[in-house]
Image (spheres, coloured by chain):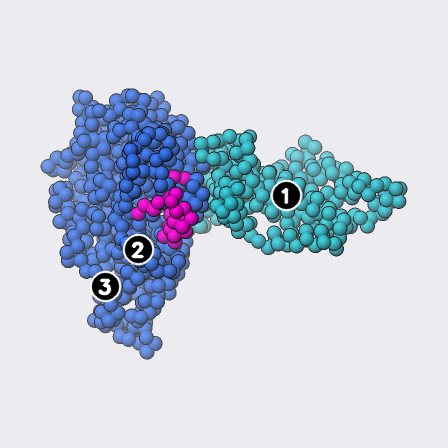
Chain colours: A blue, B cyan
Amino acid sequence: MRRLLATALATFMVASACTSSTTPPATGSSAPAAGTPVAGGRMVQGVDTEITGLQPILSGDASEIVWGQFYPRLMQNNPETGILGPALAERVEFSPDGLTVTFHLRKDIKWSDGVPFTGEDYKYSVEATIRAKAPIRKPVFSRVVGFADYNEGKTDSISGITLSADAMTISIKLTGALCTAARSLASAGGGVLPKHHFVKDWNNKTTDLTKSIDTSPLNNAPPASLGPWVFKEWQKGVQVTMTKNKNYFRGEPLLDEYVVKSYANLAAVKAALLTGEITFGETIPTDVEEVQKTTTGKMALSRATIATNYNYLGWNQKSPKAPWLANKDVRQALWYGLDVKAIIAKVQLGYATQMFSHYPKQSFVYEATGLKTYDYNVATAKSLLEKAGAKMGADGVYVWSNGQPMSMRLEGGQGASALMQVAQEQYKAIGIKIEPIIQTGPVLQQRLDPTQTDHEGHAGGWGISPDPDSAWIFFNAAQQNRGNFNWVHYENAEVTKLLDQGRLGPDCSDGTRKTIYQQVNKILNEEAPYTWLWQPESLLFHSTQLQAFAQKPYGLTTSGETWDWNVEKLWLKK
Amino acid sequence: MGRFIARRLVQAIPTIFGIMVITFALTRLSPSDPVTIMLGNNPDITEEDRAELRQKLGLNDPIPVQFARFVGDTARLDFGTSFSHKRPAIEVIGERLPNSLQLSIASLFLAIFISVPLGVVAGMKRGRFADQAIRAMSVGLHAVPVFFLGLLFVLFFGVGLQWFPIGSMNVIGESCVFCWDRLWHMAGPVIIGATGGIAFIPRVLRTEVLEILGQDFVRTARSKGLRERIVMARHVFRNALIPIVTLFGGILTILLGGSVIIEQVFNWPGLGRLLFDAANAKDYPLVQASVLIGSFLLVISYILRDLAYAWVDPRIKTG
């Protein structure tokens, strides 16, 4: 399973400004290419993160934006739909029992140094991942037959992965069916490594557990590339410089060089945009106007709805201090009592799309029919509260059936302060008292851990996988152990059963899974464990010289996995 | 002198140990789990996987055992492997330390270069316009936080006028150290880093100059018919420097401490920014190593200060 993006709240890109504006909806914008493409030039991307390593097996952070350029996966998301499509592999097949996954590799792919790419590279990458001392990506392969034996050094090769005679077909046997296996196994532990280079530092044909790829000097100097760019130089803490890969299987990039430059934060990236130091970089809604005014004619705004992020208010159904949150009518009232459209205009300045359940409109499992839209309605909210047993108190705050005033905390990060303030005002109008509390990210994450119940509401944001299995960690009743993410203690036997079915098959066909997850989406929409708010937009400014630049809902420049979907076509207008 | 340095280093051991205790305690007491940060919300990762990683990182051991291991490893100069960089913490710090020292040392010299003449002038021109202007500037610089000055600098001179870069160490595509490009990039952070010293030193020096000007030996020198410039240079200035030297150790502390902010504002890849990121990522080895090495540098700076003190004032011996 492809590693999900950010942790909670880190993705919460809520602006604090309070001016309203109307902004046309965006699902993905592109700059039309003008003129005949010319080769040459350098593009510089400004990012608000530091590159910490260039070895996918050891890297679990945003450094993927760089190493993803050298070590692609067997399959890649369609940038429009998120559906897994061809990349290094032409296609993938499941056996009827769901226990064997077969990847058919493209036969015309070469590494940047001219060596042909084969399944040996894939198998080496998997075995290196399993034996790595830092086991960040190892669990991806725990369902592969022979994993335990290879992991424990009982064998010198993982028995469940076999290659055809020409090493261009990879068969992977699983101990149990897993519908997400095609996506997760395609990752090869992050990306496919060049065995012919790394094998000199660590030979996978070994039972010696004291050795691993962790200490290879090539980890921070990628020796060959299957992606669009080839490693040139890494100035630690400053930038990584890459040159074009003439052997790139989608075609030689038009640009000569690509530099990823690290900045301390998005304010610094904005300054770099204003001075024209970078070719493109991300910004936040409150900075859009300033950058547009200051860089007129020099920078253009590229917008795309992010299909893999959303923001929400979560309601803890096991809260001892707010027992009413276990009641569906109350949770629905909390949704009706919030004017989400107005909040999007005020907090996100219109740069967001409203959501009504876990799956975004761009997902192949999304079906609008039957989903409630919870249009803002104070009267409906109040009637639902009264239906649930609440009675209006003398002070304008409802009193729950146990005699307790309906007052509760709403916790969130600094980025959610404007949202929480508006929510406090709007919930007052429906007779619910909210106490907003700002917490630091780590404190909030600790407080919301499923082992804790002393919290009522929280404002959060998730980065989710394009695979619909993404709901499993948030809404499966079993996901309530330490470190899990069912923070709202949601328990619905039917949802849990459906999520397990969608995850474990054995029927992993798109059609069956689509039916399953549409049901899940409807139940979640009805039961309202979250008040779903919006999908933010990715807002990037890019030099007007940069042509063919575009973002897609599943093909964003901020994601190392997906952004290179058309990178070879980018060019600079002279 | 060798014995003096050795004695001071031995005396620093309890200080360093105290810093180790505090740093270790703060990293462990601060909320959130580094394993959760490292693994994220990957559904394939089970509680057993998390436990395995905790075990490998030694985080399952009782706190006293973890601390004893930290002390033992530090004694062998093994600072562990950074959780986020997956390389030895000392190696990561080794890449950044020279960058921080470039800024700190340059800021220190700039502060001295500007503030010593200002302090002497303020003392000599007591009560006159120059004195009052220097005092006003000193108070003003004291009152404005360094990060704010830094942001103003970036805004006006970087984004607005574009006289200076908005940050970083070189233009994109360059990596030279001893070149005009590096100097140009250092200008902003060095000027802002020096403001602390420029605010502080002239006030101390002014008081010192005023006190020395009233001393008998100055009166004697003047009565011998020495020219005023010689009196100031040989008798007043040298004696006034003695307390200034004692301040240098402290100023280096401020500069290194302030580098966390300066490096953030000017996007300078130094130890301060590394420590900031490491603290956010709960990278225990990197935080511990950064703080310890920073502390050790301060100890060294205090020893250097004492040696300079003895050089300026021959009455003081280091032996």
3 and 2 marks in contact (CB < 8 Å)? no
- Identify the residue at image location x=73%, y=43%: B241
Q: Are marks 3 and 2 on the same chain?
A: yes
- The answer to whether residue A7 is seen in the rendering is no
Return the x and y of residue B71 as percentages of the image width and height. 51, 39
Query: For residue B111, which numbered disc appears in the image?
Result: 1
Q: Residue furthest front?
A: A35
In terms of sequence position, does the residue under pointer 3 or pointer 2 come before the other?
Answer: 2
What's the magenta region? A278-303
Return the x and y of residue B234 as percentages of the image width and height. 79, 39
Query: For residue A23, which numbered disc appears in the image?
Result: 2
User: At numbered mark 3, what does the secondary structure look like: helix, strand or loop?
Assistant: loop
Q: Is residue A130 left or right of residue B215?
A: left
Q: Is residue A366 left or right of residue A34?
A: left
Q: Quadrant of the N terminus of chain A?
A: top left
A310 w.r.t. A69: above or below: below
B204 w.r.t. A220: above or below: below
The kind of residue tagged 2 is: Thr
Please report, as a chain letter, where disc 1 is located: B
Query: For residue A5, which numbered disc appears in the image?
Result: none
Q: Are marks 3 and 1 on the same chain?
A: no
The kind of residue tagged 1 is: Ala
Q: Is residue B250 left or right of residue A216?
A: right
User: At numbered mark 1, what does the secondary structure look like: helix, strand or loop?
Assistant: helix
Callout 2: 10 Å neighbours few (<14), some, many (20+)? Answer: few
